[in-house]
Amino acid sequence: MNGVTRDRWSASQRLELHFWQTWTKAAPYQNLDVPKYWSEELPRFGCSRDFFTGRRVLDIGCGPVGLIHFVDNAAERIRIDPLLLQYESRMTLQGPQLSLAGLGEALPLASDSVDLAICFNALDHMQDPSAALAEIRRVLRPGGTLLLMIHSFPKWARPFFWIDRLHPHHWTAPAFVSQVGHTFEVERSETVRRRFEVPVSKWILPSSWKYLAGNLVVASTYVRARK
Ligand SMILES: C[S@@+](CC[C@H](N)C(=O)[O-])C[C@H]1O[C@@H](n2cnc3c(N)ncnc32)[C@H](O)[C@@H]1O
């Protein structure tokens, strides 16, 4: 997957910031139980919270309420996101931790220093996903694990990708798994249809339409990979 221009990425990031400033008002997220959400996502990678115990964990593109905030059994937690300082609603981290406003494409960390990396719903938001995968590989210790999730799309939807300005990149599930396989050993992958829960009473709201359309085309692809 080739990178996009800085302008294209910056335009997506402006939409991203707006999303996180308003997300709790969007129909699918109004009553979201965030800890429950994460406990239901972990089994998709074939792991539980115990997987993080005693490990140095890095979350790349962590957002304000990403998985890193819910694994307080890790030995050390590192979170990085270019918008981190602008997320006024960002959660705090307790215990050994490092918070960085930065890019997945240039991780300010030593090589072979991280046990477990998370990149959840973030690689398809980056300017250069290939460069970010190479950086994640560099900082992971040999045998370290990467947990990845992206939103994936069917091939037939390709002519419509341009409509989705929030994501600079779009993959089909097989193309994504194949790309990860160029840099890591893929241990398992799973693709499931994405269901945005929109109450029928809210279908009439224009702000709900993209989620209803998303229910027709969007899937989530989960990959667990090893360096
Ligand atoms: C959809 S959010 C996901 C946040 C979080 N991982 C979660 O699942 O709740 C995508 C995140 O990727 C971040 N992002 C975009 N470009 C990035 C880059 N080049 N390096 C690291 N993170 C990036 C965005 O700022 C945003 O916080």
Image: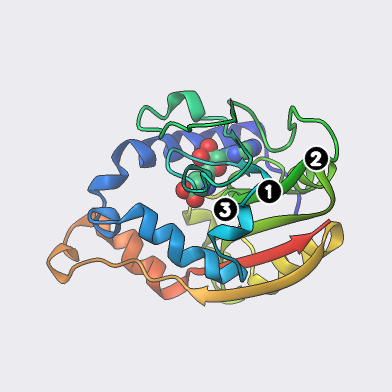
Q: Are marks 1 and 2 in contact (CB under 8 Å)?
A: yes
Measuring from the top left, give residue 89's x and y in whole percent: 35, 32
Residue at the disc numbered 1: 117
The image quadrant of residue 64 is top left
Q: Does 3 appear above or below 149?
A: above
Amino acid residing under circle 2: Val
Q: Does 6 appear above or below 193?
A: above
| N-terminal-most mark, 2 or 3 | 3
The image quadrant of residue 90 is top left
| Ligand 1 within 8 Å, label 3 CB | yes
Measuring from the top left, give residue 178's x and y in whole percent: 78, 68
Secondary structure under the numbered disc 2 in the rendered image: helix
Q: Which mark is residue 11?
A: none
Quadrant for ligand 1? top right
Residue at the disc numbered 2: 139
Q: Quadrant of the C terminus?
A: bottom right
Residue at the disc numbered 3: 120
